[in-house]
Amino acid sequence: MGIWRNVTDTFSEERRHYSNTYLEICEVYDEAVEVSIFSADNNQYEIYVSYGIMYGIIYCSQEEAYEKFEEIKRVLEKDYEENKEPSNQFINEFAKIYGLCLPNDIFFDAPSLFELF
């Protein structure tokens, strides 16, 4: 079994400020799963999740952020230990339960994307 490592200090103070948010904590599991908490001035917190092909943001209040952060870590760790990669079923269920959203600031290379079809 892997362990969760707090890697927050690997980010400079400047890099912890991102798009009107602030990186409060970033933890990784077995170098394969990442869960981070970002705070914002409007009391809207963001929990960033990255696990295999699944990634996104879960929006929540400051009051529920850290409890939800720990819960999400447990869920992702369990699935990672059992499967190493998230299944489509896991992704769909996780997204539905936690309200996982794609970040607003993701950019796609449209010409390259259209070449796929």
Image (spheres, rainbow, N blue to C red):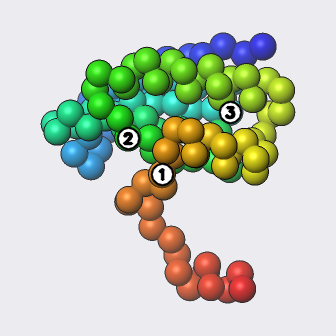
In this view of the protein, which residue sits in the foreground, 58 or 52? 58
Residue 114 % position (x, y):
62, 85
Residue found 65% across the figure and 25% down from its top: 75
Q: Earlier in the sequence, mark 3 or mark 2?
A: 3
Q: In this view, does 92 lie above or below 13?
A: below
Does the CB distance between marks 1 and 2 fall below 8 Å? yes
Does the CB distance between marks 3 and 2 fall below 8 Å? no
In this view of the protein, which residue sits in the foreground, 13 or 29? 29
Question: Which quadrant does the N terminus fall into?
Answer: top right
What kind of residue is marked 3? Ala
Residue 46 % position (x, y):
37, 38
Residue 43 % position (x, y):
20, 33
Q: How crowded is mark 1: few (under 14 residues within 10 Å), some or many (20 or more)?
A: some
Q: Which of marks 1 and 2 is nearer the N terminus?
A: 2
Q: What element carries label 1?
A: loop
* Residue beneath disc 2: 59
The quarter of the picture where residue 74 lies is: top right
The quarter of the picture where residue 106 lies is: bottom left
Q: Nearer the viewer, mark 3 or mark 2?
A: 2
What kind of residue is marked 1? Cys
Q: Residues within 10 Å of mark 3 (few under 14, many from 20)?
A: some
Q: Residue 93 vs residue 103: left or right? A: right
In this view of the protein, which residue sits in the foreground, 4 or 96? 96
Residue 24 % position (x, y):
33, 25
Q: Residue 9 vs residue 54: left or right? A: left
- Residue 32: mark: 3
Residue found 26% across the figure and 37% down from its top: 44
Q: Distance between the residues labelled 3 and 2?
A: 22 Å
Q: Residue 100 vs residue 54: left or right? A: left
Q: How far apart are marks 1 and 2 (CA)?
A: 8 Å
Q: Which residue lies furthest to the right in this view?
A: 83
